[in-house]
Amino acid sequence: MEGVCKIRIPNAYPYILSALKVTATSAVVGAIVGEFVASQRGLGYVIITSQSSMNTPLAFGALVWISIIGLALYGAVAGLSSVLAPWAEGQSNR
């Protein structure tokens, strides 16, 4: 039974890490939408309040920060992917 886990888990790393790349960026979107609905602070709240006060530069600044956070999370998962499954580089693109 132990040999089965040693073989299957490493083979699953590329698929798990590909799913993490997608969900890491989706989590940022989900957090912002949650802040749109019910929040008193955060980037979603900043976007909503800047929209109502017509402060476009502040809204774009918040969008830039959201983009940076999403890219950082994606980069962190991609870096983790290259450490945990170096043999699978480029497989997810096929």
Image (spheres, rainbow, N blue to C red):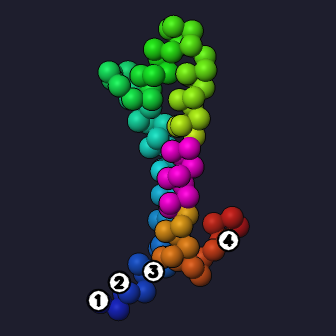
Q: Mark number for residue 1?
A: 1
Of 48 and 57, nearer the camera is 57
Disc 1 residue type (three-letter): Met
- Image point (48%, 76%), residue name: 84
Observer-side mark, 1 or 4, equals: 4
Q: CA distance from mark 1 to mark 4?
A: 31 Å
First in residue order: circle 2 vs circle 4 = 2
**Cβ atoms at labels 2 and 1 below 8 Å apart:** yes
Residue 39, compared with residue 75, is above or below; it is above
Q: Amino acid at mark 2?
A: Cys
Question: Does the residue at mark 3 contact the one at mark 2 (Cβ under 8 Å)?
Answer: no
Q: Nearer the viewer, residue 83 or 93?
A: 83
Residue 33 seen: no
Identify residue type, mark 4.
Answer: Gly
On the image, numbered disc 2 is attached to which residue? 5
What numbered label is drawn on residue 10?
Answer: 3
Q: Residue at x 57, y 40 (%)?
A: 67
Rendered location of residue 43, percent (x, y): 45, 29
Give above or below for 77 relative to 27.
below
The mark nearer the N terminus, 1 or 3, is: 1
Cα gap from disc 2 to disc 4, whole angstroms: 24 Å
Q: Is residue 87 above or below residue 36?
A: below
In the displayed structure image, the side of residue 62 where residue 5 appears, left or right: left
Q: Nearer the viewer, residue 28 or 54?
A: 54
For disc 4, the neighbor class at 10 Å (few under 14, some 14 to 19, many from 20) is few
Q: Quick one: quadrant of the C terminus?
A: bottom right
Sequence order check, earlier mark of 3 and 2: 2
Magenta extent: 68-77
